[in-house]
Image: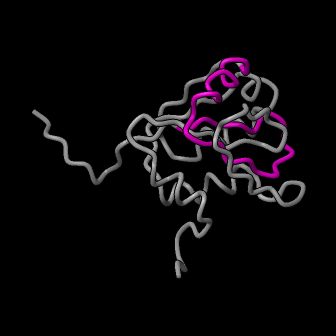
Amino acid sequence: MRESGIVNREISDVLSTLGHTDEMIVCDAGFAIPLGVRTVDISYSENKPTVPDILKELREHLSVESLVISEDTQKKMPQRFQELAQAFGDIPIDVVAQSELRVRAKSVKAIIRTGDFTAFSNVLIVSGGGPRWKVERP
C-alpha cells in the first residue's frame, strides 16, 4: 500500500503519463472543463483544496518547464497571479488570454479540478525534464 508522496491514485497515474512538453491544468471550481478531457476532481468543499495547495504538492513530484496563466488572473487577481507564478520557483511564465487557456484546455492530458473559489485560479503546467537529466554542455 502506498503511504508516501501523492496517494491519490488518479493524480499519481496522470503524473506517470506526462512526458516532456505534455500539458495539464490545475483549475478552480468554476473552470469550464471541455468534454472528453480526463478530469480528476478532488474538490470536496468550498476552497478545499485550493489550487496553491495542489501546486505545492506537485512541486515535490513533478518537473515543470513552464506555466501558462491567464492575463485575467494577472490583471484582476494580481496576488493570486504571483502565488501561481512562483509555485515552481524561477521558471518561464506565459501569460495568455483567458480564451486561449480555454482552447488549450481541450488538448491537455488531464485537468485536476479543485474546490478553489478564488476567481481565475487556473494554471496550465508544461511538463519538463528535471535536474536528473544529463545534458552535455560545450
In the image, what residue occupies the spot 76% across and 53% down? 50
User: Is 106 within the magenta?
Assistant: yes
Which one is nearer the viewer's eye here, 38 or 113?
A: 38
In the image, what residue occupies the spot 72% across and 31% down? 34
Give the quadrant of residue 106.
Answer: top right
User: Is 67 within the magenta?
Assistant: no
Q: Is residue 86 above or below residue 60?
A: above
Which contiguous range is marked in magenta?
98-125
User: In the rendered view, does 64 fall on the left or right side of 122?
Assistant: left
Which one is nearer the viewer's eye here, 47 or 14?
A: 14
Q: What is the tally of numbered marks visible in this picture?
A: 0
Q: Is residue 32 above or below residue 114?
A: above
In the image, what residue occupies the spot 84% across and 38% down? 30
Give the quadrant of residue 65.
Answer: top left
Q: Position of residue 115 (x, y in %)?
A: 82, 52
User: In the rendered view, does 58 fall on the left or right side of 33?
Assistant: left
Q: Quadrant of the C terminus?
A: top left
Which one is nearer the viewer's eye here, 24 or 82?
A: 24
Q: Position of residue 111 (x, y in %)?
A: 65, 42
Residue most extreme to the left: 138
Give the quadrant of residue 102.
Answer: top right
User: In the rendered view, does 82 fall on the left or right side of 22?
Assistant: right
Q: Position of residue 74 (x, y in %)?
A: 72, 27
